[in-house]
Amino acid sequence: MAEDKSNEGILYIVPTPIGNLKDVTLRALEVLKEVNIIATEDTRTTGKFLKLLGLPKKRLVSYYDNVEGEKSAQILNLLQSGNNIALISEAGTPLISDPGYKLVVRCIDAGIRIVPLPGATAFVPALVASGLPPNVFKFFGFPPKRKGLKKFLELISQETSTSIIYVPTHSLLKFINELFQYVEPRRKICIAKEITKYNEEFIRGTIEEIVSFVNSNKLVVKGEFVVIVEGKGGNQC
């Protein structure tokens, strides 16, 4: 006889705006209004976010990288007790270079229903506005800080599809100069800055041109960056 799970809650994976609050979907607003609990990377940021959108206060459970194992077990228990829970990240789609994977796996293993909502993420708008082929691409996420960086750059240098990398503000100049050591000077790249925000900008050119540009202090290194790299051999749509 099948186990009755009708009294268990649902885990909703809810994207949140990466900059412009108008990018929140009507469905996301509805879910955030109706769920019992919100699991979030930063409870303070989420509290402000709910207030800005005119949403009611919710019970917030912190869920970030360093506590994923412990908190995923806690959230699973809450779901099994009948609570509907929304998982959100500080900005963008959970699990995409953000916490959430361990919780999703636990929920699948336990037979908890998972409902993913489509919505904001930085790499898709960066890719489609980059001018580089979007038909085949590989998302690399954030580069390693030290150990493994050489291998990471070597992988990008040999990748034949379009490569997508998230680069923190403080690492951009160093990363672009290091990338130049591995990638042919005529390979095209695009730096997408502050996607959806007031200072949104796309810097396009060859890696040789971009290195010269960033080293000349013409680029204001502020905000979040997505770096798109043309595939080896110039992949085409």
Image: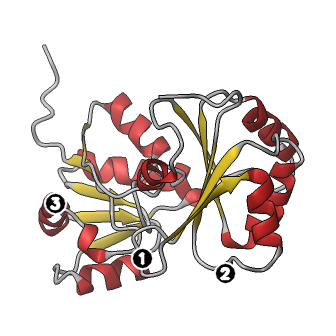
Q: Amino acid at mark 2?
A: Val
Compute the Cα span from label 1 to label 3.
25 Å
Name the residue: 77% across, 43% down.
186
Does residue 72 lie above or below 107 as drawn? below
Q: N-terminal of the two: label 2 or label 3?
A: 3
Q: Amino acid at mark 1?
A: Lys
Is there any visible trace of residue 215 in the rendered image? yes
**Depth check: 115 or 97 in front?**
97
Q: Which residue is mark 3?
A: 31
Name the residue: 14% across, 69% down.
33
Name the residue: 29% across, 56% down.
14
Say which quarter of the image contains residue 3.
Answer: top left
Query: Left or right: 13 with respect to 164?
Result: left
**Depth check: 139 or 210 in front?**
210
Expressed as whole percent of the image width and height from the top left, the position of residue 148 reads: 83, 43
Does residue 102 lie above or below 190 as drawn? above
Q: Which residue is mark 1?
A: 197
